[in-house]
Amino acid sequence: MKYTYEELAKMIDHSLLQPTVTDQEFEEGCKIAAKYGVASVCIKPYAVKRAIELLRGTGVKVGCVIGFPHGNSCTESKRYETELACRDGAVEIDMVINIGKALSGEWNFVENDVKAVCDEAHKHGAKVKVIFENDYLAKGGAGLSGDDFKRKLCQICERAGADWVKTSTGYGFVKQPDGSYNYKGATAHDIALMRATCSPKVQVKAAGGVRDLDGLIMTRDLGCTRCGATATAALLDEYRRREAAEKAGQKLESKGGGIGSGGY
């Protein structure tokens, strides 16, 4: 295998953000995160205290979303939501930029909004991932192309103190020509662009659309250190399946009966 189990598992922020998640489903999700040894759970603010209880001693971090999913809360609300989450025990914060202000070219507003959350989180020893919602930015805005717009946001977030820049929420649904709603989420193009724009001190997180092991590996190859996922069990079970198959193949080969061994 190209990467170890631990290298890939510790990329995953196990997402428990669906609007319909019940208390039972939330607790089961935390158990899955602990069982598979992922990096963190990414959860709603009200659930932080309970997640801390459930995950104590497992090595799985508790992360909390702020201004989620559309980034529309006022800056002070985002700052205070961050304060409460950190007080409750969250050590990672996933905040959403004010997308409308960004598309309006209100760059100072966007930077101050991000900085307020970063400053508050860092005061408590927590780290911040800043979500762009790239599906809304494909056509650009404020006189910039889509790619230049994303580069501008990377630069702003780095100045503001972000520890990660993140592609998507996983809930940035865009109306399609047939009237339905869908999203792309993380794409190879956007991940590469964000990684190339930020300095090494800012990491990149992919979210939305990564549903299988090959997708997770692709994000790692492109420079991501974290990836949001709901299909954690399926991803990592597939890793174990491939790992076992590879080991079995190696054993056969060493006995002279495998492909490349000269036997038939």
Image (cartoon, rainbow, N blue to C red):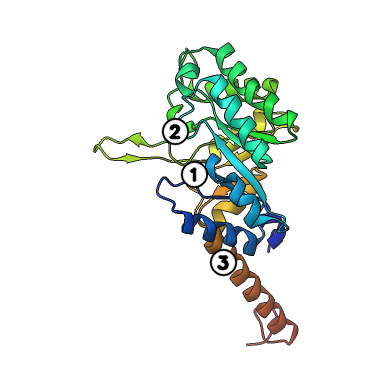
Per the image, the residue denoted by label 1 is 208
Q: Amino acid at mark 1?
A: Gly
Classify 37 as above or below 69.
Answer: below
Of the numbered discs in the image, which one, if any, rests on residue 238? 3
- The reply to whether callout 2 and callout 1 are in contact (CB within 8 Å) is yes
Q: Is residue 203 left or right of residue 24?
A: right
Q: Amino acid at mark 3?
A: Glu
**Residue 61 x %, y %:** 68, 49
Q: Quadrant of the C terminus?
A: bottom right
Mark 1–mark 3 distance (CA, rounded to whole Å): 19 Å
Q: Residue at x 69, y 20 (%)?
A: 159
Q: Residue farthest to the left?
A: 178
Q: Is residue 148 left or right of residue 176?
A: right
Q: Quadrant of residue 32?
A: bottom right
Of the numbered discs in the image, which one, if any, rests on residue 6? none
Of the numbered discs in the image, which one, if any, rests on residue 135? 2
Mark 3–mark 2 distance (CA, rounded to whole Å): 29 Å
Q: Quadrant of the N terminus?
A: bottom right
Q: Residue at x 57, y 42 (%)?
A: 206
Q: Could one spot residue 44 in this view of the protein?
A: no
